[in-house]
Amino acid sequence: MFRYLALMLGACLIAMLPTEPVSAQGQCRFCDTNPPPQGEGGGRPGNGPGGNGNGNGNAGGNGNGNNGNGNNGNGNGNGNGGVGNGNGNGNAPDLFIESDIDFGRLIMIGAGEGSVLLDPTTGMKIVAGQLEDFGGFTVQGRATIVGRRFRQVQINFPNRVIMRDPRGGMAELRDFETNLSALPTLDADGVLEFTFTGTLVTDSQIGRGGDLRGTIPITVDYN
């Protein structure tokens, strides 16, 4: 049996006219409004025996429209976050999400085809392609696993997550990484903390940006 945690994520990239002011600092609007899901478990620690839970998070940003060279403008994306399932002594370890992934500020150049990676250990932002770093606060995702002492666990991420805008814009979050060793093991208190990140990939399907949303399913189980 395993624990399943679905995390909401998003990124908002808006193309505006050059005369508009640029405001590209992302915010997590839903992280403090996560109610416990129905049934056992819960959306926050202490809501009962272990069970399925959901964590919410979002990202925000702005783009600054086309310049004389036809280049698109500034953008920003925050990653996933929220709070996981409740405490318990079930057959699988519990997973709690402590913080979001935040990609900080980005500049889209041309069609905005590129990628952004946050190093899971240092938090360094690595930007490639038709994207440029425009500063802003970046942070890796942080999580805690609670379960049986000295037990090895495995954490599984999806291959990719499609982020969509209602108007048709799309981007991907993929190639998830953690700072865990090859055989992650709970300590003497039955706790294991780790950081995780992914690579945000944009291409021509990003269009003029928009309010992108997606869901990351994460599972954890004993080896």
Image: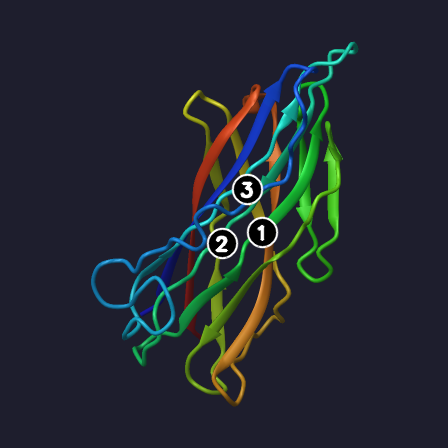
Q: Earlier in the sequence, mark 1 or mark 2?
A: 2
Question: Counting other residues with Cα less than 10 Å from the Cα at mark 2, is it few (<14), some (14-19), or many (20 or more)?
Answer: many
Q: Using the image as rendered, state which of residue 209 and residue 32 is in the foreground.
A: 32
SS for callout 2: loop
Which residue position is annotated with label 3?
A: 173
Please state the horizontal and vertical placement of residue 57, each as a whole percent of the image.
47, 49
* Badge 1 or badge 3: first in the primary sequence: 1
Kind of residue at disc 2: Gly
Q: Disc 1 vs disc 2: Cβ atoms closer than 8 Å? A: yes
Residue that badge 1 annotates:
101
- Identify residue type, mark 1: Ile
- The residue labelled by disc 2 is 81
Crowding at label 3, few (<14), some or many (≥20) Cα neighbours within 10 Å?
many
Residue 20 point in image, percent of width and height: 66, 19
Total labels drawn: 3
Instruction: Name which quarter of the figure residue 108 lies in.
Output: top right
Q: Residue at x 73, y 47 (%)?
A: 125
CA separation in Å, label 1 and label 3: 11 Å
Which residue is outermost to the right?
69
| Mark closer to the chain start, 3 or 2 | 2
**Quadrant containing the N terminus in the rendered view:** bottom left
- Foreground: disc 1 or disc 3: 1
Is residue 159 placed above or below 165 in the rendered structure?
A: below
Type of amino acid at the residue the image marks with label 3: Leu
Toward the bottom, the furthest residue is 188
User: Which one is in front, 175 or 210?
Assistant: 210
Q: Secondary structure at mark 3?
A: strand
Report the quarter where the C terminus lies.
bottom left
Q: Are marks 3 and 2 in contact (CB under 8 Å)?
A: no
Q: CA distance from mark 1 to mark 2?
A: 7 Å
